[in-house]
């Protein structure tokens, strides 16, 4: 009998640079924009990260949504007020080589189906600049949202996607890029009671979107950057989602991960359900939408009333919550990914996304041990899952030895 060697495959672990938005002070980075990337690569090396997800966003002077109105303000670590050219790319690649920290992908998270044509055009033009930067850096993917036109049904938005978004995917194909969609429903994007304001929020629409892309020859461009926090937010569990994709023949769709959890508040869930708070949020004043951006941010109570983001490793170990889908079981998450998805494991990034408000301090020295701990936790969880998978599915299976126990089952919770 041949003996299969024990060779676990680990995923690279990284961090989204929005975790510390102003690592480089504005008075330094605005006149020297690539300094922010150099500083973040050096900081990531101190954190013990293998890679960064490089956050791009419209400069605060150009953004259509004030930071005060956002739940988690984005970072324009990649500053694209001027085009990213070969000289800028050389400088960044030099910093990658010097620090030993790679760039997993570029992230630009915005509503690409915005209702206003001029605003939508501005966002699409910026996305093309992100694509250009990714190509020059030799990065293989850009991560972002699809978004939603709030005045249309989801079915109508699929048609809008086909007409308005697919051309972006043709541009991605010409640059040999993937566009990885993240599934956050973005409930706070609107002041009405709509909870799902990003049509790429669930596997059912991922498949519908991919089928549209296949008809237009850009199926290889559309992939998913899966974030389990959003599954918890919508009452789903990771293993069942992965099993569903496998059952439907779409286990290949996921090609990256945001490592961010969600902790459901049972009292908030009892009060509002998974649809979140619908009245008395504070985003309306005297029956009309508030003018103050900070007041408009109360639209996010649709989410905050029932849960809170988890930075991996900061929530208590809670087996009952895992079984109730009220927080992420990280070990089973990493096992299910290996068991059910079609992954190139060693090239599939785990990107720590820090949105746990209480720990989201914007001071590099205070934040450093927090991120170090979370990155280390994520790495060890993945290593444990990799070892279990290799031992059970390769070593024992190769010798015909059964695995003990039952384990968590899809569709059973």
Image: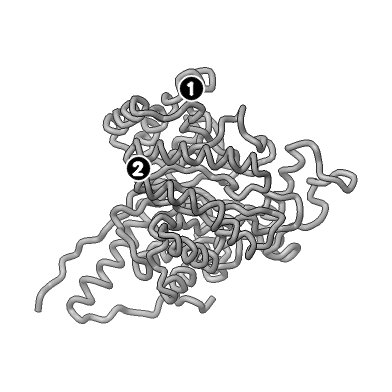
Q: Determine which quarter of the picture holds residue 386.
A: bottom left
The reply to whether residue 377 is in sight is: no
Pointer 2 or 1: first along the chain:
1
Location of the N terminus by quadrant is bottom left
Where is 74 relative to 258, above or below?
Answer: above
Image side of residue 53 versus residue 288, left or right: left
Q: In the image, is 83 to the left or to the right of 146?
A: left
Which quadrant of the view contains residue 151?
Answer: bottom right
What's the mark number on residue 20? Answer: none
Image depth: mark 2 or mark 1 in front: 2
Residue 198, image x, y percentages: 60, 55
Decide if residue 198 is on the left or right side of residue 7: right
The residue to which callout 1 is attached is 29
Identity of the residue drawn at 78% across and 46% down: 283
Above or below for 351 versus 62 = below
Q: Secondary structure at mark 2?
A: loop
Viewer can see residue 64: yes
Few, some or many C-alpha atoms within 10 Å of disc 1 (few <14, some 14-19, many ≥20)?
A: some
For disc 2, the marked residue is 139
Q: Nearer the viewer, residue 406 or 346?
A: 346
Q: Is residue 292 above or below residue 242?
A: above
Residue at 48 percent of width and 22 percent of height: 29
Image coordinates for residue 312, horizontal then vertical, percent? 48, 51
Residue at x-position 31% and y-position 28%: 90
Image label count: 2
């Amino acid at each position: 009998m041949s003996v299969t060697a024990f060779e676990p495959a680990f995923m690279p672990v990284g961090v989204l640079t929005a975790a510390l938005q102003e690592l480089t002070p504005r008075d330094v980075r605005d006149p020297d924009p690539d300094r922010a990337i150099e500083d973040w690569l050096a900081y990531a090396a101190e954190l013990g990260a293998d890679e960064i997800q490089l956050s791009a966003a419209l400069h605060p002077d150009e953004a259509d949504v004030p930071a005060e109105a956002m739940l988690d303000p984005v970072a324009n670590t990649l500053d694209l007020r001027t085009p990213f050219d070969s000289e800028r790319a050389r400088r960044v690649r030099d910093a990658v080589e010097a620090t030993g920290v790679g760039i997993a992908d570029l992230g630009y998270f915005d509503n690409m189906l915005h209702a206003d044509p001029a605003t939508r055009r501005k966002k699409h033009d910026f996305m093309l600049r992100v694509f250009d930067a990714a190509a020059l850096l030799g990065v293989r993917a850009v991560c972002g949202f699809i978004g939603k036109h709030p005045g249309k049904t989801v079915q109508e938005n699929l048609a809008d996607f086909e007409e308005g978004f697919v051309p972006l995917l043709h541009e991605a194909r010409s640059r040999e890029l993937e566009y990885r969609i993240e599934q956050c429903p973005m409930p706070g994007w609107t002041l009405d009671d709509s909870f799902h304001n990003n049509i790429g929020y669930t596997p059912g629409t991922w498949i519908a979107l991919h089928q549209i892309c296949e008809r237009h020859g850009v199926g290889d461009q559309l992939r998913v950057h899966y974030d389990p926090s959003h599954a918890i937010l919508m009452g789903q569990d990771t293993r069942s989602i992965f099993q569903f994709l496998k059952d439907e023949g779409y286990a290949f769709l996921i090609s990256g991960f945001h490592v961010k959890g969600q902790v459901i508040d049972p009292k908030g869930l009892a009060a509002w359900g998974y649809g979140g708070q619908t009245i008395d949020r504070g985003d309306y004043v005297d029956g009309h939408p508030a003018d103050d951006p900070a007041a408009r941010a109360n639209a996010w109570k649709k989410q905050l009333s029932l849960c809170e983001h988890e930075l991996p490793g900061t929530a208590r170990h809670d087996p009952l919550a895992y079984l109730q889908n009220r927080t992420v079981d990280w070990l089973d998450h990493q096992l299910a990914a290996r068991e059910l998805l079609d992954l190139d494991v060693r090239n599939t990034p785990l990107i720590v996304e820090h949105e746990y408000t209480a720990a989201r301090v914007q001071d590099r020295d205070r934040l450093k041990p927090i991120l170090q701990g979370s990155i280390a936790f994520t790495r060890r969880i993945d290593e444990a899952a990799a070892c279990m998978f290799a031992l059970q599915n390769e070593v024992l299976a190769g010798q015909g030895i059964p695995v003990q126990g039952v384990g968590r089952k899809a569709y059973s919770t």
